Image (cartoon, rainbow, N blue to C red):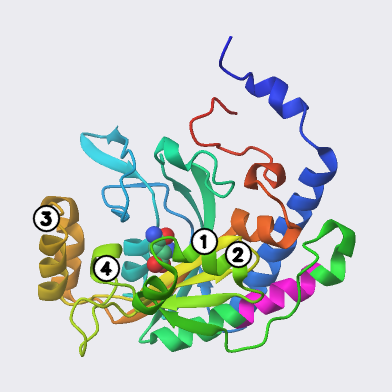
Amino acid sequence: MSEANPIENFFFKDKEKIVTGTRVNTIIRGSMKRYLDRRGFLEINPVVISPISDPLNHPVDDPTIDYYGHRYRLTKSMIFHKQLALVHFDKIYSFSPNIRIEPLDRKSTGRHLAEFTQLDLEVKGADRRAVMALAEGMINDSIARVMRYIDGDKLNPDLRKYPRPFRSVKYLEALEEYGEDFEAKMSAEARDPFWIIDIPLQQREFYDREKDDETGILMDMDLIYPHGYGEAISGGEREFEFERILSRIIKKGQRQEDYALLLEASRKGISPSAGFGIGIERFVRFLTGSKNISEVVLFPKEIGKYVL
Ligand code: ASN
Protein backbone atom coordinates (compact mmCIF):
# COMPACT_ATOMS: atom_id res chain seq x y z
CA MET A 1 0.00 0.00 0.00
CA SER A 2 1.74 3.17 -1.14
CA GLU A 3 -1.04 5.66 -0.46
CA ALA A 4 -1.08 7.12 3.06
CA ASN A 5 -4.25 6.55 5.03
CA PRO A 6 -5.76 9.98 5.77
CA ILE A 7 -7.56 8.83 8.91
CA GLU A 8 -4.45 7.24 10.37
CA ASN A 9 -2.44 10.41 9.68
CA PHE A 10 -5.13 12.52 11.27
CA PHE A 11 -5.09 10.54 14.53
CA PHE A 12 -1.29 10.70 14.66
CA LYS A 13 -1.12 14.47 14.64
CA ASP A 14 1.04 16.20 17.26
CA LYS A 15 -1.74 17.51 19.48
CA GLU A 16 0.28 20.26 21.13
CA LYS A 17 1.40 21.70 17.80
CA ILE A 18 -2.05 21.60 16.26
CA VAL A 19 -3.63 23.24 19.31
CA THR A 20 -1.02 26.01 19.35
CA GLY A 21 -1.36 26.49 15.59
CA THR A 22 -5.11 26.73 15.86
CA ARG A 23 -4.93 29.16 18.80
CA VAL A 24 -2.51 31.37 16.87
CA ASN A 25 -4.81 31.14 13.87
CA THR A 26 -7.74 32.28 16.02
CA ILE A 27 -5.77 35.20 17.47
CA ILE A 28 -4.43 36.54 14.17
CA ARG A 29 -7.76 36.31 12.41
CA GLY A 30 -9.26 38.34 15.25
CA SER A 31 -6.43 40.86 15.39
CA MET A 32 -6.32 41.43 11.63
CA LYS A 33 -10.10 41.78 11.48
CA ARG A 34 -10.03 44.27 14.33
CA TYR A 35 -7.15 46.19 12.73
CA LEU A 36 -9.05 46.56 9.47
CA ASP A 37 -12.50 47.17 10.97
CA ARG A 38 -11.07 50.08 12.96
CA ARG A 39 -9.79 51.58 9.75
CA GLY A 40 -13.17 51.54 8.03
CA PHE A 41 -12.87 48.28 6.04
CA LEU A 42 -15.90 46.13 5.29
CA GLU A 43 -15.60 42.36 5.36
CA ILE A 44 -17.08 40.70 2.28
CA ASN A 45 -17.95 37.03 2.06
CA PRO A 46 -15.50 34.82 0.22
CA VAL A 47 -16.30 33.72 -3.30
CA VAL A 48 -15.70 30.00 -3.78
CA ILE A 49 -16.80 29.41 -7.38
CA SER A 50 -17.14 31.91 -10.21
CA PRO A 51 -16.76 32.14 -14.00
CA ILE A 52 -13.61 34.18 -13.39
CA SER A 53 -10.57 33.70 -11.18
CA ASP A 54 -6.91 34.61 -10.88
CA PRO A 55 -4.77 33.17 -13.73
CA LEU A 56 -1.74 33.07 -11.38
CA ASN A 57 1.74 33.32 -12.80
CA HIS A 58 2.65 29.66 -12.53
CA PRO A 59 0.83 26.68 -14.00
CA VAL A 60 -1.74 25.04 -11.76
CA ASP A 61 -4.54 22.68 -12.72
CA ASP A 62 -7.71 24.65 -13.29
CA PRO A 63 -10.62 22.35 -12.51
CA THR A 64 -14.03 23.66 -13.46
CA ILE A 65 -17.53 22.66 -12.52
CA ASP A 66 -20.70 22.86 -14.52
CA TYR A 67 -22.93 25.51 -12.99
CA TYR A 68 -26.33 25.49 -14.72
CA GLY A 69 -24.63 25.18 -18.09
CA HIS A 70 -21.80 27.66 -17.39
CA ARG A 71 -18.18 26.78 -16.64
CA TYR A 72 -17.23 27.92 -13.17
CA ARG A 73 -13.75 27.91 -11.69
CA LEU A 74 -12.66 27.31 -8.11
CA THR A 75 -11.25 30.50 -6.62
CA LYS A 76 -7.46 30.78 -6.85
CA SER A 77 -7.60 34.29 -5.45
CA MET A 78 -10.32 36.90 -5.17
CA ILE A 79 -8.35 39.53 -7.07
CA PHE A 80 -11.08 40.39 -9.61
CA HIS A 81 -13.88 40.24 -7.05
CA LYS A 82 -11.87 42.62 -4.90
CA GLN A 83 -11.61 45.07 -7.78
CA LEU A 84 -15.33 44.69 -8.51
CA ALA A 85 -16.28 45.14 -4.85
CA LEU A 86 -14.78 48.63 -5.03
CA VAL A 87 -17.57 49.63 -7.42
CA HIS A 88 -19.71 49.77 -4.27
CA PHE A 89 -17.24 50.08 -1.36
CA ASP A 90 -13.98 51.89 -0.58
CA LYS A 91 -12.02 49.38 1.48
CA ILE A 92 -12.75 45.68 1.67
CA TYR A 93 -11.28 42.42 2.88
CA SER A 94 -12.20 38.78 2.89
CA PHE A 95 -10.85 35.65 4.54
CA SER A 96 -10.83 33.81 1.28
CA PRO A 97 -10.33 30.07 0.77
CA ASN A 98 -8.21 29.44 -2.33
CA ILE A 99 -7.78 26.19 -4.25
CA ARG A 100 -4.55 25.82 -6.18
CA ILE A 101 -3.72 22.38 -7.51
CA GLU A 102 0.01 23.08 -7.41
CA PRO A 103 2.62 21.13 -9.39
CA LEU A 104 4.17 18.18 -7.54
CA ASP A 105 7.56 19.87 -7.32
CA ARG A 106 6.04 22.09 -4.61
CA LYS A 107 5.40 19.05 -2.44
CA SER A 108 8.33 19.43 -0.05
CA THR A 109 8.59 23.18 0.35
CA GLY A 110 6.90 23.05 3.75
CA ARG A 111 4.85 26.12 2.83
CA HIS A 112 2.50 25.07 0.02
CA LEU A 113 -0.99 23.69 0.44
CA ALA A 114 -3.50 23.01 -2.33
CA GLU A 115 -6.20 24.63 -0.19
CA PHE A 116 -5.40 27.59 2.02
CA THR A 117 -6.90 30.84 3.26
CA GLN A 118 -5.66 34.29 2.48
CA LEU A 119 -6.76 37.52 4.00
CA ASP A 120 -7.25 39.38 0.75
CA LEU A 121 -7.84 43.15 0.87
CA GLU A 122 -8.18 46.05 -1.54
CA VAL A 123 -8.36 49.83 -1.12
CA LYS A 124 -9.90 52.21 -3.65
CA GLY A 125 -7.57 55.01 -4.78
CA ALA A 126 -4.66 53.76 -2.64
CA ASP A 127 -1.08 53.64 -3.83
CA ARG A 128 1.42 50.88 -3.14
CA ARG A 129 3.12 52.68 -0.25
CA ALA A 130 -0.21 53.06 1.59
CA VAL A 131 -1.03 49.35 1.51
CA MET A 132 2.55 48.42 2.43
CA ALA A 133 2.26 50.61 5.52
CA LEU A 134 -1.08 49.00 6.33
CA ALA A 135 0.45 45.52 6.05
CA GLU A 136 3.39 46.45 8.29
CA GLY A 137 1.12 47.82 11.00
CA MET A 138 -1.23 44.85 10.80
CA ILE A 139 1.58 42.31 11.03
CA ASN A 140 3.22 44.00 14.02
CA ASP A 141 -0.14 44.27 15.74
CA SER A 142 -0.81 40.55 15.25
CA ILE A 143 2.67 39.63 16.48
CA ALA A 144 2.14 41.71 19.63
CA ARG A 145 -1.16 39.94 20.36
CA VAL A 146 0.23 36.48 19.74
CA MET A 147 3.19 37.20 22.04
CA ARG A 148 0.80 38.41 24.69
CA TYR A 149 -1.48 35.36 24.67
CA ILE A 150 0.75 32.40 23.76
CA ASP A 151 3.67 31.09 25.83
CA GLY A 152 7.00 32.10 24.32
CA ASP A 153 8.29 28.52 24.25
CA LYS A 154 5.55 27.61 21.76
CA LEU A 155 6.46 30.45 19.41
CA ASN A 156 9.18 31.31 16.93
CA PRO A 157 12.03 32.42 19.24
CA ASP A 158 13.05 35.19 16.83
CA LEU A 159 9.69 36.91 16.94
CA ARG A 160 9.51 40.59 17.83
CA LYS A 161 7.92 43.83 16.83
CA TYR A 162 9.78 44.78 13.65
CA PRO A 163 11.08 48.31 13.00
CA ARG A 164 9.10 50.17 10.35
CA PRO A 165 9.12 50.88 7.50
CA PHE A 166 10.34 47.44 6.47
CA ARG A 167 13.27 47.49 4.05
CA SER A 168 12.42 47.46 0.30
CA VAL A 169 14.64 45.88 -2.33
CA LYS A 170 13.99 46.10 -6.06
CA TYR A 171 13.49 42.74 -7.77
CA LEU A 172 16.19 43.27 -10.39
CA GLU A 173 18.72 44.41 -7.80
CA ALA A 174 17.98 41.35 -5.64
CA LEU A 175 18.35 39.12 -8.70
CA GLU A 176 21.66 40.71 -9.63
CA GLU A 177 23.12 40.37 -6.15
CA TYR A 178 21.84 36.92 -5.14
CA GLY A 179 21.01 35.17 -8.43
CA GLU A 180 17.89 33.21 -9.42
CA ASP A 181 17.21 31.86 -5.94
CA PHE A 182 17.33 35.32 -4.35
CA GLU A 183 14.10 35.03 -2.41
CA ALA A 184 15.16 31.93 -0.46
CA LYS A 185 18.68 33.22 0.11
CA MET A 186 17.61 36.66 1.26
CA SER A 187 14.87 35.21 3.46
CA ALA A 188 17.38 32.86 5.15
CA GLU A 189 19.77 35.76 5.78
CA ALA A 190 17.21 38.29 6.97
CA ARG A 191 16.39 39.06 10.59
CA ASP A 192 13.42 41.30 9.75
CA PRO A 193 10.67 41.01 7.13
CA PHE A 194 11.49 42.86 3.90
CA TRP A 195 9.76 43.85 0.68
CA ILE A 196 10.68 42.88 -2.86
CA ILE A 197 9.26 45.63 -5.07
CA ASP A 198 9.13 46.54 -8.76
CA ILE A 199 8.65 42.98 -9.98
CA PRO A 200 8.98 42.69 -13.77
CA LEU A 201 5.95 42.09 -15.92
CA GLN A 202 6.89 38.53 -17.00
CA GLN A 203 7.09 37.44 -13.37
CA ARG A 204 3.56 38.53 -12.49
CA GLU A 205 -0.06 38.29 -13.49
CA PHE A 206 -1.55 40.82 -15.91
CA TYR A 207 -3.55 42.70 -13.28
CA ASP A 208 -0.69 44.40 -11.40
CA ARG A 209 -0.13 47.90 -12.72
CA GLU A 210 2.78 48.70 -14.99
CA LYS A 211 4.80 51.74 -13.97
CA ASP A 212 4.12 54.84 -16.04
CA ASP A 213 7.80 55.75 -16.10
CA GLU A 214 9.38 52.29 -16.42
CA THR A 215 8.14 49.93 -19.12
CA GLY A 216 7.91 46.30 -18.06
CA ILE A 217 8.21 47.02 -14.33
CA LEU A 218 5.16 46.79 -12.08
CA MET A 219 3.92 48.76 -9.08
CA ASP A 220 3.76 45.60 -7.03
CA MET A 221 5.42 43.94 -4.06
CA ASP A 222 5.99 40.76 -2.11
CA LEU A 223 6.69 40.69 1.60
CA ILE A 224 9.25 38.07 2.63
CA TYR A 225 9.54 36.65 6.15
CA PRO A 226 12.98 36.47 7.77
CA HIS A 227 14.79 33.31 8.98
CA GLY A 228 14.00 31.40 5.78
CA TYR A 229 10.19 31.41 6.07
CA GLY A 230 9.76 32.81 2.56
CA GLU A 231 6.85 34.69 1.03
CA ALA A 232 4.24 36.26 3.30
CA ILE A 233 2.31 38.68 1.12
CA SER A 234 1.86 39.55 -2.50
CA GLY A 235 0.05 42.56 -3.87
CA GLY A 236 0.31 45.79 -5.77
CA GLU A 237 -1.45 48.61 -7.54
CA ARG A 238 -3.84 47.38 -10.22
CA GLU A 239 -4.61 47.94 -13.86
CA PHE A 240 -8.16 49.28 -14.12
CA GLU A 241 -8.46 50.80 -17.61
CA PHE A 242 -9.92 48.66 -20.40
CA GLU A 243 -7.16 49.27 -22.96
CA ARG A 244 -4.36 48.58 -20.54
CA ILE A 245 -5.96 45.41 -19.16
CA LEU A 246 -6.57 44.14 -22.68
CA SER A 247 -3.02 44.81 -23.79
CA ARG A 248 -1.62 43.07 -20.70
CA ILE A 249 -3.86 40.01 -21.26
CA ILE A 250 -2.56 39.83 -24.83
CA LYS A 251 1.07 40.36 -23.80
CA LYS A 252 0.74 37.58 -21.26
CA GLY A 253 -0.67 35.21 -23.89
CA GLN A 254 -3.87 34.74 -21.94
CA ARG A 255 -7.24 34.01 -23.59
CA GLN A 256 -9.39 37.12 -23.78
CA GLU A 257 -12.58 35.03 -23.47
CA ASP A 258 -11.52 33.94 -19.98
CA TYR A 259 -11.50 37.55 -18.84
CA ALA A 260 -14.43 38.90 -20.86
CA LEU A 261 -16.35 39.75 -17.70
CA LEU A 262 -13.44 41.73 -16.27
CA LEU A 263 -13.00 43.57 -19.58
CA GLU A 264 -16.71 44.39 -19.65
CA ALA A 265 -16.54 45.72 -16.08
CA SER A 266 -13.50 47.84 -16.90
CA ARG A 267 -15.40 49.39 -19.82
CA LYS A 268 -18.16 50.38 -17.44
CA GLY A 269 -15.52 51.78 -15.10
CA ILE A 270 -13.64 50.28 -12.21
CA SER A 271 -11.44 52.31 -9.89
CA PRO A 272 -7.73 52.55 -9.39
CA SER A 273 -6.80 50.56 -6.30
CA ALA A 274 -4.08 48.73 -4.46
CA GLY A 275 -4.22 45.71 -2.23
CA PHE A 276 -2.61 42.47 -1.19
CA GLY A 277 -3.21 39.04 0.22
CA ILE A 278 -1.55 37.43 3.22
CA GLY A 279 -1.59 33.66 3.60
CA ILE A 280 -3.01 32.79 7.02
CA GLU A 281 -1.45 29.32 7.35
CA ARG A 282 1.98 30.64 6.36
CA PHE A 283 1.67 33.39 8.93
CA VAL A 284 0.85 30.74 11.58
CA ARG A 285 3.84 28.68 10.44
CA PHE A 286 6.12 31.69 10.84
CA LEU A 287 4.68 32.73 14.20
CA THR A 288 5.02 29.23 15.65
CA GLY A 289 8.43 28.68 14.05
CA SER A 290 7.23 25.45 12.42
CA LYS A 291 9.15 23.70 9.70
CA ASN A 292 6.12 22.41 7.85
CA ILE A 293 2.81 24.20 7.40
CA SER A 294 1.01 20.85 7.85
CA GLU A 295 2.07 20.66 11.51
CA VAL A 296 -0.07 23.65 12.43
CA VAL A 297 -3.12 23.11 10.18
CA LEU A 298 -5.86 20.69 11.21
CA PHE A 299 -6.80 19.45 7.74
CA PRO A 300 -3.82 20.34 5.55
CA LYS A 301 -4.34 19.76 1.83
CA GLU A 302 -0.79 18.62 1.26
CA ILE A 303 0.40 18.72 -2.32
CA GLY A 304 0.09 15.37 -4.03
CA LYS A 305 -1.24 13.51 -0.98
CA TYR A 306 -4.49 11.71 -0.27
CA VAL A 307 -5.81 13.81 2.63
CA LEU A 308 -9.02 14.60 4.47
N1 ASN B 1 -4.02 38.24 -3.31
C1 ASN B 1 -3.00 38.64 -4.25
C2 ASN B 1 -3.13 40.13 -4.53
O1 ASN B 1 -3.96 40.79 -3.96
C3 ASN B 1 -3.08 37.86 -5.52
C4 ASN B 1 -2.82 36.39 -5.36
O2 ASN B 1 -3.03 35.79 -4.33
N2 ASN B 1 -2.40 35.74 -6.43
O3 ASN B 1 -2.36 40.63 -5.32
Q: Residue placed at 70% from the left, 26% from the top?
A: 9
Left or right of 178: which side holds 225? Answer: right
Labelled pair 3, 4 in contact (Cβ < 8 Å):
no
Q: Amino acid at mark 4?
A: Tyr
Residue at which label 2 appears:
188
Residue at which label 3 appears:
256
Q: Could you tell me how far apart the alpha carbons at marks 1 and 4 are, in whole angstroms?
A: 25 Å
Question: Between disc 4 and disc 2, whose residue precedes?
Answer: 2
Labelled pair 2, 1 in contact (Cβ < 8 Å):
yes
Helix, strand or loop under label 3: helix
- The residue carrying mark 4 has its beta carbon less than 8 Å from ligand 1: yes
Residue at which label 4 appears:
207
Q: Amino acid at mark 3?
A: Gln
Question: Between disc 3 and disc 4, whose residue precedes?
Answer: 4
Q: Which residues are magenta?
A: 137-146
Q: Is residue 290 something that shows in the picture?
A: yes
Q: Residue placed at 32% from the left, 35% from the top?
A: 63
Helix, strand or loop under label 2: helix
Q: Is residue 145 magenta?
A: yes
Quarter of the image containing the C terminus?
Answer: top right
Q: Could you tell me how far apart the alpha carbons at marks 2 and 1 are, in whole angstroms?
A: 6 Å
Quarter of the image containing the N terminus?
Answer: top right
Q: Residue furthest top?
A: 1
Q: Nearer the viewer, mark 1 or mark 4?
A: 1
